[in-house]
């Protein structure tokens, strides 16, 4: 390690965010542009270059984290970019979107704030593009083999890039009109601006990967035809079959799935629509689901000008510190965290039922039923507090105003490939 005492002398500092009042007026990324790089050298110095680096095990990609931390601390950005790209095709995506289980596995996290691994990763990726350290890498020769990749999300794109670089002729089939899967139409621009995605797609085109958009396998092209046309198929369709909430009143108008809502907001940002047909503007919004997709809906609704926004989480509010018995290091702990969207809702006091800290989330809450206005449109949501076993607590039922409800309950597996699991809205 470059500084043997870095973890003792340097406190953890993260990429600062833009002021809430400023960032909710646009769809740009929430962090202060240019403010990350000056922090990264000292933050990389905090890495202890452990003999047994648990961050490797915690990272789903097996990133060589201590290696590129050391290289960043020495300002060897080219070598750091090479080491990072050795295990990660798209570090500018993961550096912005990954929940960073590597930081939970950092040895420092046993009794200190972890190294800002995710921020270091993002800084390397961005610097690589700025300095030209990530040029297209077409193969020296072709293998004569052909591969079709079905799906252009991160898995499909990564598989396609690796296969192309190995010399195979690769075509990616995507049912949407643009590439990227959930990165394109699910992830809001304030979490990852789409130019990062466009840049990688252009790199892949330069390497020789072919793309077929607006093509649904099984409808626009027959699966048997693909099997006969290509030497191999890679199925990377993701999990798009959303979970339902089967409670009384679900049929009322104004209740939508998160993945009906978020793509339309992204299409507004892409310039396809002037305004979303499912806009939260002026509405009392309740989001059912406490995960990342729910937080994405929260930040989107705030930017659209919702009258109020509340998010329901069926789990009890976690603590601020790791439970050493239930979730010992180096497991990824369930902690009380404030995403940028939660920070925005808190500071703007968007939730009518917010707690004393202004948190827009209602924890340990289960939806009982929806109530309409007599004309078939939702007007209220009845909820009840639940215990650790998700059993209703007697006497805790209450009502929230809700004329716009979003269901963010996760996904149960791959979709049908038809239109039933596709975003609605008339486009």
Image (cartoon, grey):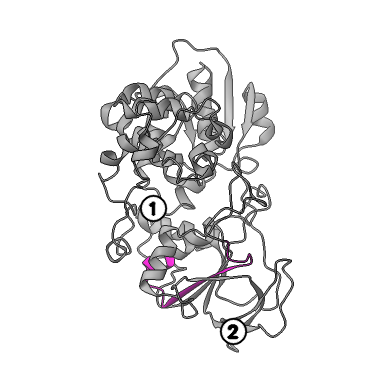
> Which residue is denoted by mark 1 in the rendering?
189
| Residue 226 percent location from the top left of the image | 64, 30
Q: Nearer the viewer, mark 2 or mark 1?
A: 2
Residue in the picture at 36% in, 72% down: 348
Q: Position of residue 12 (x, y in %)?
A: 37, 45
Q: Is residue 426 visible?
A: no
- Whether residue 211 is visible to the viewer of this picture, yes or no, is yes
Q: Give percent across and percent down for residue 107.
A: 52, 37
Question: Earlier along the polypeptide chain: callout 2 or callout 1?
Answer: 1
Give 417 or 167, whichever is nearer the viewer. 167
Q: Which residues are magenta?
A: 299-318
Relative to the observer, which residue lies in front, 46 or 37?
46
Residue 255 tag number: none
Q: Secondary structure at mark 2?
A: strand
Residue wearing tag 2: 399
Q: Is residue 331 above or below residue 139?
A: below
Residue located 57% across and 37% down the image: 58
């Amino acid at each position: 390690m470059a500084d043997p005492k870095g973890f003792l002398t340097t406190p953890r500092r993260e990429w600062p965010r833009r002021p809430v009042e400023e960032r909710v007026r646009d769809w740009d990324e929430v962090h202060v542009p240019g403010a990350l790089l000056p922090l990264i050298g000292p933050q990389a110095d905090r890495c202890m270059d452990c003999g047994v680096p648990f961050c490797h095990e915690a990272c789903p990609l097996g990133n060589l984290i201590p290696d590129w931390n050391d290289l960043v601390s020495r300002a060897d950005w080219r070598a750091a970019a090479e080491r990072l790209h050795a295990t990660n095709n798209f570090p500018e995506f993961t550096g912005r979107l990954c929940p960073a289980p590597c930081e939970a596995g950092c040895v420092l996290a046993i009794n200190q704030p972890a190294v800002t691994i995710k921020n270091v990763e993002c800084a390397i990726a961005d610097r690589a593009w700025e300095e030209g350290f990530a040029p297209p890498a077409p193969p020296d020769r072709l293998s004569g083999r052909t591969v079709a990749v079905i799906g252009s999300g991160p898995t499909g794109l990564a598989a396609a890039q690796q296969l192309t670089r190995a010399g195979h002729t690769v075509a990616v089939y995507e049912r949407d009109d643009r590439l990227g899967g959930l990165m394109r139409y699910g992830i809001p621009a304030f979490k990852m601006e789409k130019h990062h995605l466009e840049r990688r797609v252009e790199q892949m085109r330069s390497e020789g990967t072919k793309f077929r958009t607006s093509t649904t396998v099984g409808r626009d092209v027959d699966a048997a035809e693909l099997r006969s046309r290509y030497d191999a198929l890679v199925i990377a369709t993701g999990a798009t079959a959303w979970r339902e909430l089967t409670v009384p009143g679900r049929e009322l108008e104004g209740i939508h799935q998160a993945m009906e809502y978020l793509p339309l907001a992204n299409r507004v940002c892409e310039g396809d629509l002037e305004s979303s047909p499912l806009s939260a503007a002026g509405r009392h919004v309740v989001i059912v689901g406490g995960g990342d997709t729910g937080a994405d809906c929260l930040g989107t609704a705030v930017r659209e000008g919702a009258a109020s926004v509340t998010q329901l989480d069926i789990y009890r509010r976690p603590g601020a510190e790791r439970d050493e018995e239930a979730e010992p290091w180096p497991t990824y702990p369930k902690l009380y965290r404030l995403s940028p969207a939660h920070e925005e809702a808190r500071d703007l006091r968007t939730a009518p039922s917010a707690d004393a800290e202004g948190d827009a989330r209602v924890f340990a809450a289960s939806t009982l039923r929806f109530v309409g206005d007599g004309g078939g449109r939702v007007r209220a949501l009845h909820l009840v507090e639940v215990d650790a076993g998700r059993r209703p607590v007697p006497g805790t039922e209450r009502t929230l105003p809700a004329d716009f409800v979003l269901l963010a309950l996760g996904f149960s597996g791959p979709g049908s490939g038809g239109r039933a699991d596709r975003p609605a809205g008339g486009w």
